[in-house]
């Protein structure tokens, strides 16, 4: 395996190449500028410790099908010898996401053995495989005069876990919500609490992915059906991990958590989880 320094140098060189090819900040931007600065200091000999992975967002215009997709790339420290982590962050049908993920997995299996940076080649490959992002006629999507229309139904899912400490699980909880365009929150610690809202098919997919992980206990507390598109029924504008509510022992501040729910008119769920009113002083 190549040295860490060699891998980081190749990653930074590739990022600079992508910046030149996609100079607009609307097309390309670093997802974590601190990680970029940390990597440069490492190469300059100012630091001998790397804590963060380089990652960036790239918007790619697919002219043949007249759409734009947003991709997130996360380099493992030993990329290109290890496969890059690629997430499709544009809302498309579950069918499209599945086709994309399967095809990307095959592409990465072929490229990792080359041990050379390949993001530019991957972007060309995407342009040659734009059919991955087309929706088949048997889905709920319909095409009228070139426009894609979908009848949307929303739901909100409340999940209970015995605990959420594992770093990889916490990363999946957040990344999958972003990938599926779901809003809500996760409260790590003991117990762990997750809430997601969005299109019902995506909420169901999220629950399926979580259940496939190993848990001491994972339970669906409640599922709220919000009906057809009605933004007034939604309570969140993004998905975030509420790690700021944790104390030094990894336990949540339930007083602040109750206030967080109350601010979103969801305080009834506190009783569902804990069996008592959050304002109870006992």
Image (cartoon, grey):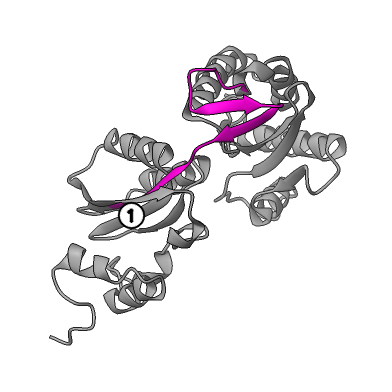
Q: Is residue 109 above or below residue 84?
A: above
The total of numbered circles placed on residues is 1
- Residue 139 horizontal side relative to residue 205, left or right: right
Asked if the magenta segment contains residue 5, the reply would be: no
Residue 72 visible (yes or no): yes
Quadrant where the image shows the N terminus: top right
Q: Specify the farthest residue to the bottom.
A: 281
Given residues 83 and 155, the one toward you in this image is 155
Query: Who's the residue at 19% across and 69% down the image?
Result: 271
Tell whether 195 sits left or right of 220.
right
Element carrying mark 1: strand
Tell me if I can see residue 83 in this picture.
Answer: no
Residue 85 location (% of width, % of height) = 55, 33
Residue at the image point whose x is 20% and y is 63% from the top: 273
Q: Is residue 135 magenta?
A: yes
Q: Which residues are magenta?
A: 134-158
Q: Position of residue 12 (x, y in %)?
A: 74, 39
Instruction: Note whether 61 is above or below 227 in the view shown.
Output: above
Foreground of the two, 94 or 25: 94
Q: Which residue has dot 1 on it?
A: 194
Is residue 87 shown left or right of residue 152?
right
Q: Of 115 and 129, which appears nearest the observer?
A: 129
Q: Position of residue 64 (x, y in %)?
A: 77, 21
Looking at the rendering, which quadrant does residue 66 occupy?
top right
Q: Quadrant of the C terminus?
A: bottom left
Image quarter of residue 206 = top left
Q: Is residue 131 above or below residue 93?
A: above
Q: Position of residue 278 (x, y in %)?
A: 23, 78
Q: Residue at x 71, y 39 (%)?
A: 58
């Amino acid at each position: 395996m190549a040295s860490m320094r060699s891998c980081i140098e190749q990653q930074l060189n590739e990022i600079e190449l992508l910046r030149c090819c996609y100079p607009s900040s609307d097309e390309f931007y670093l997802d974590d500028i601190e990680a970029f600065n940390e990597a440069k200091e490492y190469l300059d000999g100012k630091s001998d410790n790397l804590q963060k992975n380089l990652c960036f967002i790239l918007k790619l215009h697919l002219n043949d099908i007249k759409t734009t997709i947003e991709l997130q790339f996360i380099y493992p420290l030993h990329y290109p010898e290890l496969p890059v982590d690629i997430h499709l962050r544009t809302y498309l049908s579950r069918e499209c996401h599945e086709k994309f993920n399967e095809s990307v997995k095959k592409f990465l299996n072929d490229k990792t053995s080359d041990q050379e940076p390949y993001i530019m080649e991957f972007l060309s490959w995407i342009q040659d495989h734009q059919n991955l992002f087309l929706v088949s006629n048997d889905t709920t999507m319909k095409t009228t005069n070139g426009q894609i229309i979908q009848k949307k139904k929303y739901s909100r899912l409340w999940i209970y876990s015995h605990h959420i400490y594992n770093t990889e699980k916490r990363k999946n909880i957040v990344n999958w919500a972003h990938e599926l365009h779901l809003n809500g929150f996760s409260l790590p610690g003991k117990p762990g609490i997750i809430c997601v809202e969005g299109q019902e098919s995506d909420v169901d997919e999220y629950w399926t992915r979580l259940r496939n992980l190993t848990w001491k206990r994972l339970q669906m507390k409640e599922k709220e059906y919000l009906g057809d598109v009605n933004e007034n029924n939604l309570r969140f504008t993004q998905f975030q991990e509420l790690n700021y509510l944790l104390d030094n022992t990894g336990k949540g501040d339930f007083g602040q958590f109750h206030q967080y729910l109350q601010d979103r008119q969801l305080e009834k769920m506190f009783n569902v989880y804990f069996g008592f009113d959050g304002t109870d002083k006992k």
